[in-house]
Amino acid sequence: MSIGEKRTLNAYYKRRFYRGRTAFARAADFIALRVILLIACYLWFSFNVESIIAAAVLTAAAVGAISVFAELVKSVRLEKFILRENARLSKKLFSESLVLMPRSEFLSIVREYIKRHGKEFAGESLVYTAQTLSPVDEETVLCACRAANRRGCKSLFIFSSASVSQPARDIAARYDGLSVAFISGDMLASCAKMPDDNAVRQYILKQAEQKKQIKKQSVSTAIGRGRCARYLLVAAALFALSFFVSYTLYYRMLAGACVSLAALSFYAAHSPSAAPKDA
């Protein structure tokens, strides 16, 4: 794994761990908390120690010890979070694979589940499978229940690759004389091979690359070909309006920004990388 990939993975885990806060926001919080801690420790030691130098030394030692302990706790929490996040993404990838895998492979997972829980399927029961992307709805439950009634079954097991909607559960509960049980994709995970950590890492890197491409496309759209004349037209309009409004400076600043964007658009359209390559 390259250094860039490691940085991408670390950035993803930290962004999820800190609930979307950027590196700048985390650095600002770190500095602010250390300053508050430094002031609090110095005030406490200055009131309890006669020497100012001793108070300063004790303050530095206390802040350093607390900071080291906080970083150790944070690193342990981050490691546990990474394990939980990998498990969550592994389940997500498995749920997506249940929909995309061939029908025969999905049925083999169902058979493995029945083999492991054979006692639950004893008696007259019907197994109904729904390999769909959307949650199991009322129509699916109605079709399964009608099929079970036609065969005279007393119990019905609906295996689904997705979750089960609440209206579907409500419909199933209203059937008299028929026991309906739902086995969703999360329950099937114990009978199949889950995606490993390498698959999870590749998924994270792929998502990060897609986001990077989207950002590049949005920037290239803003300064793409054909935008130069439009920016110059807007700049001229703003500059002309600046003579008729009170906030002259703001209008001219915006006009200057439009001229800068026009220059970037002109450069992007005439740069060597934008020239078409010969086949």
Image: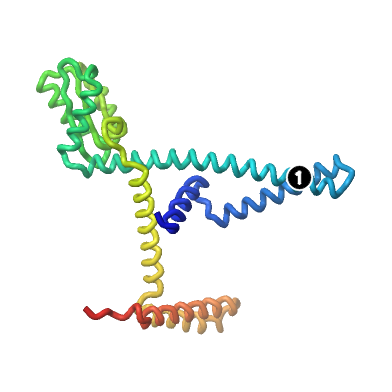
Q: Label 1, secondary structure: give it.
A: helix
What residue appears at the point 79 percent right and 47 percent down from the top-left corner?
Answer: 57
Name, please, the residue furthest toward the left. Answer: 150
- Rendering coords of residue 158 (x, y %): 22, 28
Of 54 and 93, nearer the camera is: 54
Name, please, the residue furthest toward the front. Answer: 1
Q: Is residue 243 above or below residue 17?
A: below
What residue appears at the point 41 percent right and 69 percent down from the top-left corner?
Answer: 219
- Rendering coords of residue 231 (x, y %): 43, 79
Q: Kindly indicate the quadrant of the structure image that contains residue 135.
A: top left
Q: Tell me the kind of residue under disc 1.
A: Ala
**Any part of residue 209 in sight:** yes
- Please name the residue that numbered disc 1 is placed on: 40
**Any part of residue 164 in sight:** no
Of 148 and 217, nearer the camera is: 217
Of 191 and 121, nearer the camera is: 191
- Rendering coords of residue 126 (x, y %): 16, 23
- Circle 1 packing at 10 Å, graded few (<14), some (14-19), many (20+), is some
Q: Is residue 60 above or below residue 187?
A: below
The C terminus sits in image quarter: bottom left
What residue appears at the point 59 percent right and 76 percent down from the top-left corner?
Answer: 247
Horizontally, is 194 left or right of 259 in the view?
left
Q: Is residue 252 above or below residue 57?
A: below
The N terminus sits in image quarter: bottom left
Q: Kindly indicate the quadrant of the structure image that contains residue 153.
A: top left
What residue appears at the point 68 percent right and 42 percent down from the top-left corner?
Answer: 66
Horizontally, is 69 left or right of 236 in the view?
right
Horizontally, is 85 left or right of 76 in the view?
left
Number of numbered discs = 1
- Rendering coords of residue 209 (x, y %): 37, 58
Q: Kindly indicate the quadrant of the structure image that contains residue 117.
A: top left
